[in-house]
Image (spheres, rainbow, N blue to C red):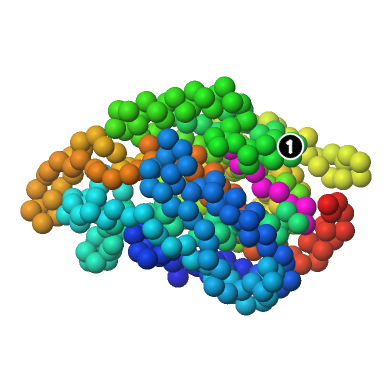
Amino acid sequence: MASIIGKHLKVSIFGQSHAAGIGCVIDGLPAGESIDLPLLSQFLARRAPGSSPLATARKEADIPEIISGLYQEQTCGAPICAIIRNTDTRSADYAELADKPRPGHADYPAHIRYGGAQDVRGGGHFSGRLTAPLCIAGGICLQILNRYGIDIGAHIYAIHNIYDDPFDPCTPAPAILDALTRKPFPTINDKQGAEMQSIIQRAKDAGDSVGGMIECTVLGLPAGIGDPIFGGMENRLSAALFGIPAIKAISFGDGYESGTMFGSENNDVMTIENGRIITKTNHAGGILGGITTGMPLWFRCTVKPTPSIAKEQQTISLSAQTDTLLSIHGRHDPCIVPRAVPCVIAATAIVVLDAILDSSYASLFQNHLLHCTFE
């Protein structure tokens, strides 16, 4: 069950980085929803490798092959099964890793967990390559959510110690979210974005890597979505987001900073504006008690530096049981953050649509739709 997520809407991810292909199965989508396949391909292109000098040189078209679940470009009630064929693999680059696990990577715990039978090529099923089918599922969910007035946007909030302008936590501008989808390096402040790219290039030139943060927001969610205790929106989102390799921390709303505040500072004062209940601030990130408040849902993810780096590092030899040195070959991103932005959007879209499709929320969602503006 490790590769399956969801309650009403179940998404399963399968494949390995250097296997014949990777893919997903999406079960529980409502029938009759139109799916724009060219638009889905545009979304996948934001994550695809080989599109930037600051990304891996591996070239994959990442064109999804829909095996089932669509008829005349509409969901038909059957599970959607989609496959992406792997075409540009260099498995020889990874031969040494069966004996010499990479520091910072899952090679060693995978060796213990699977008794040495794991696929080490390209990281096997621990690879970021598996986020491509995640983006298929999330891209489909995003189209359905957009149709009903719910939008999800994200940007590179930080690379190393350089920070982008943050989203407005109360009223993020839809125009900014839209503009970010068309930027090859999605930052709000292009000057800060240029500095971030410079840091990534310096790390690459040094045979090193760098990490950062992604900020994500969800607009248009009504109040009342989610459950307390273990079924909260933070719980569900965290489970999906931590399925993205390299995500190491998630902070909802003010998150860590809320621990430095007084209650009078952290509490979001409620008011009525144009007949609608809102809060003047949004320190809670649009979630209280695991349930949405009707304010924008927002959070930040921390992404660690890519563990596969060219710099020589100390590791161990599993066969000889001695310390040894490792120089990693192959094609790797000096920074995962830019290509992880659509992955965060995809994981969020899956969770949000799953929560809405839960039968106990159906009437809430229908009431919300009555107030949406359809284009």
Q: Is residue 375 magenta?
A: no
Residue under pointer 1: 175
Picture coordinates of residue 70 (x, y %)? 64, 72
**Nearest the eye: 256 or 242:** 242
Q: Quadrant of residue 1?
A: bottom left
Q: Measuring 56% from the left and 59% from the top, which residue is drawn there?
A: 136
The magenta stretch is: 148-155
Q: Measuring 82% from the left and 63% from the top, which residue is drawn there?
A: 366
Q: Secondary structure at mark 1?
A: helix
Picture coordinates of residue 207 (x, y %)? 29, 32
Taken as a whole, is the magenta stretch helix, strand or loop? Answer: strand
Please name the amino acid that badge 1 sits on: Ala
Left or right of 140? Residue 16 is left
In the image, farthest residue toward the right: 275
Placement of 346 over or under 83, stated as above or below: above
Residue 233 in view:
no
Q: Measuring 44% from the left and 24% from the top, which residue is drawn there?
A: 198
Picture coordinates of residue 322 (x, y %)? 9, 48
**Nearest the eye: 318 or 72:** 72
Left or right of 360? Residue 249 is left
Picture coordinates of residue 27 (x, y %)? 59, 72
Q: Is residue 152 magenta?
A: yes
Number of labelled discs?
A: 1
Q: Quadrant of residue 35?
A: bottom right
